[in-house]
């Protein structure tokens, strides 16, 4: 990374400011729509390069799909939680600079319950994991067989592969859980909604997956600390022409600038809640209609005492019904408090959103009861997400469904008339669906604008 930008990432503004700014830039004004990671990172880089930057955010808080909730007495990340891959990930250095402590998740430290407190033995678990690894390899190999194309989903190929394994009983449920955890939980989407060809083609950082003790929110607050962010400012119209941009808000305010960076989630763009005048180019609209938002929802519960094995990092109950297949993360390992967070993905997460938060908690408690086979305490407090109904998100994060292709992300990233620039996790094919991807995309667009103004 270029030295100047490295300093900016670390928030060392005084040092960054001492680097020369190019003449003539100060006159340019810039609007950034959205104060999530992409918007904040674009705004920081633009401001440090001498642009006059205003960030317009519809919510009453920063962060977007980064949301650290304190209602359970500790900072709980109800949106993004992990720094995925600590090695060379720019977020790792940033977290260190901000003084955020982290704990590496040990995804191997898990248990699979079959009911009444019984769990698969270590030997059974290793057979399950080996078989699941074989199936994942076969899925990967199927990409090159020439029998699949862009319309093939992962579920299509699993439907052919799985019968060959003649799986039955608890072993079958365990292997299906392992595959769902690896594929569907990761993308917040059912295997039928994931393109096989696009799956596993994005890049990843090596190293540990880190949970943040003080929460992701602290990181965003640090990055945004000297930016002009207008909260409660819902953009409803983006008009642009060769001379500049004119943004209208839902309450009738007008903001004008030379250029704008749009970091709206693709679900929001698809919903039509923001009208573009003139309409976005056909190629961009087509890419937008092909890509999809997945869904991941969280049910966080705080108990008076832990009734689960405190050493575990995660566990699941292997029920008959797929909507019981919640995965529970033990946040005792992060916060030293008796807190479980249940994760639901895809159709299962959508069905949870049809329940009230209290009913969603009951659903999670029923699963726990079946797993442990005894009365379990009621949680003393809880928090439940509904990312699909959230009109500022419309889902959790993007994926490539059958019929779409990874290059659709690049099409979404293309500037329009050099007036509108597009950033956000759904605009990069290398690291989509992540916080670091959102950060890189914001930085990418800021750099593009800087180069343009040179
Ligand atoms: C449940 C969940 C778990 C996740 N887990 C992880 C994880 O562990 N690790 C990881 O790396 N990533 C994770 N992610 C993904 C990660 O959160 C996102 O990829 C990233 O935060 C997206 O940043 P962004 O800036 O692109 O979008 P956003 O954060 O969505 O920012 C867009 C902003 O635009 C605002 N906005 C929307 N509409 C308007 C409007 N009309 N006017 C003005 N403002 C508007 C929104 O309020 C928002 O603040 C998770 C996401 C979810 C939902």
Image: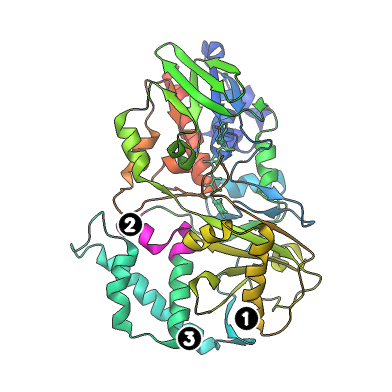
Q: Which residue is mark 3?
A: 170
**Element class at badge 1:** helix
| Residue at the image position 37 percent from the left and 51 percent from the top | 400
Q: Is residue 200 magenta?
A: yes
Q: Which residue is mark 1?
A: 371
Residue extending farthest to the left is 146
Q: Which residue is mark 2?
A: 195
**Residue 231 against residue 322 in the figure, above or below:** above
* Residue 3 at x, y percent in the picture: 54, 34
Q: Is residue 329 magenta?
A: no
Q: Quick one: label 1, few (<14), some, or many (20+) residues within 10 Å?
A: many
Q: Give the image quarter of residue 286.
A: top left
Q: Earlier in the sequence, mark 1 or mark 3?
A: 3
Q: Quick one: label 2, few (<14), some, or many (20+) residues within 10 Å?
A: many
**Element class at badge 2:** loop
User: Regarding ligand 1, which quadrant of the image does it lie in?
Assistant: top right
- Magenta-tinted stretch: 183-201
Residue 74 placement, left or right of 3? right
Q: Earlier in the sequence, mark 1 or mark 2?
A: 2
Mark 1 sits near ligand 1, with its Cβ under 8 Å away:
no
Q: CA distance from mark 1 to mark 3?
A: 13 Å
| Residue at the image position 60 percent from the left and 50 percent from the top | 92
Front one among 51 and 199: 199
| Residue at the image position 67 percent from the left and 68 percent from the top | 362
**Element class at badge 3:** helix
Q: CA distance from mark 1 to mark 2?
A: 33 Å
Q: CA distance from mark 2 to mark 3?
A: 28 Å
| Residue at the image position 68 percent from the left and 37 percent from the top | 61
Residue 278 placement, left or right of 113? left
């Amino acid at each position: 990374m270029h030295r100047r930008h490295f300093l900016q990432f670390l928030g060392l503004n005084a040092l960054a400011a001492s680097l020369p700014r190019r003449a003539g830039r100060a006159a340019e004004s810039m609007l950034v729509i959205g104060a999530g990671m992409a918007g904040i990172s674009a705004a920081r880089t633009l401001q440090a390069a001498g642009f006059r930057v205003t960030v317009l955010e519809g919510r009453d808080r920063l962060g977007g799909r980064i949301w650290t909730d304190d209602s359970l007495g500790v900072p709980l990340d109800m949106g993004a939680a992990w720094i995925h891959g600590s090695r060379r990930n720019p977020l790792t250095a940033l977290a260190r600079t901000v003084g955020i402590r982290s704990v590496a998740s040990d995804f191997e430290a898990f248990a699979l319950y079959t009911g009444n407190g019984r769990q698969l033995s270590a030997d059974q678990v290793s057979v399950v994991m080996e078989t699941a690894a074989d199936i994942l390899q076969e899925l990967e190999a199927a990409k090159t067989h020439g029998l699949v194309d862009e319309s093939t989903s992962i579920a299509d190929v699993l439907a052919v592969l799985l019968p060959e394994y003649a799986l039955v009983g608890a072993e079958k449920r365990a292997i299906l859980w392992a595959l769902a955890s690896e594929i569907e939980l990761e993308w917040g989407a059912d295997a039928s909604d994931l393109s096989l060809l696009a799956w596993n083609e994005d890049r990843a950082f090596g190293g540990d997956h880190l949970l943040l003790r003080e929460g992701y929110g602290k990181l965003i607050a640090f990055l945004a600390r000297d930016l002009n962010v207008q909260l409660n400012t819902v953009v409803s119209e983006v008009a642009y022409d060769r001379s500049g941009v004119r943004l209208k808000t839902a309450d009738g305010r007008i903001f004008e600038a030379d250029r704008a960076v749009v970091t709206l989630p693709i679900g929001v763009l698809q919903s039509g809640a923001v009208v573009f005048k003139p309409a976005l180019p056909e190629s961009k609209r087509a890419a937008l209609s092909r890509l999809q938002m997945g869904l991941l929802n969280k049910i966080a519960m705080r108990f008076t005492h832990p009734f689960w094995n405190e050493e575990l990092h995660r566990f699941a109950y292997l029920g008959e019904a797929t909507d019981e297949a919640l995965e529970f993360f033990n946040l005792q390992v992060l916060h030293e408090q008796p807190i479980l967070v249940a994760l639901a993905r895809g159709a299962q997460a959508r069905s949870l959103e049809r329940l009230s938060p209290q009913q969603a908690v009951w659903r999670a408690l029923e699963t726990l009861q079946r797993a442990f086979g005894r009365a379990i305490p009621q949680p003393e407090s809880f928090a439940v997400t509904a990312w699909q109904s959230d009109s500022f998100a419309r889902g959790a994060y993007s994926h490539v469904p059958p019929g779409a292709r990874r290059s659709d992300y690049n099409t979404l990233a293309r500037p329009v008339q050099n007036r509108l620039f597009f950033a956000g996790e759904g605009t990069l094919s290398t690291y989509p669906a992540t916080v670091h991807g959102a950060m890189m995309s914001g930085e990418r667009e800021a750099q593009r604008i800087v180069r343009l103004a040179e």
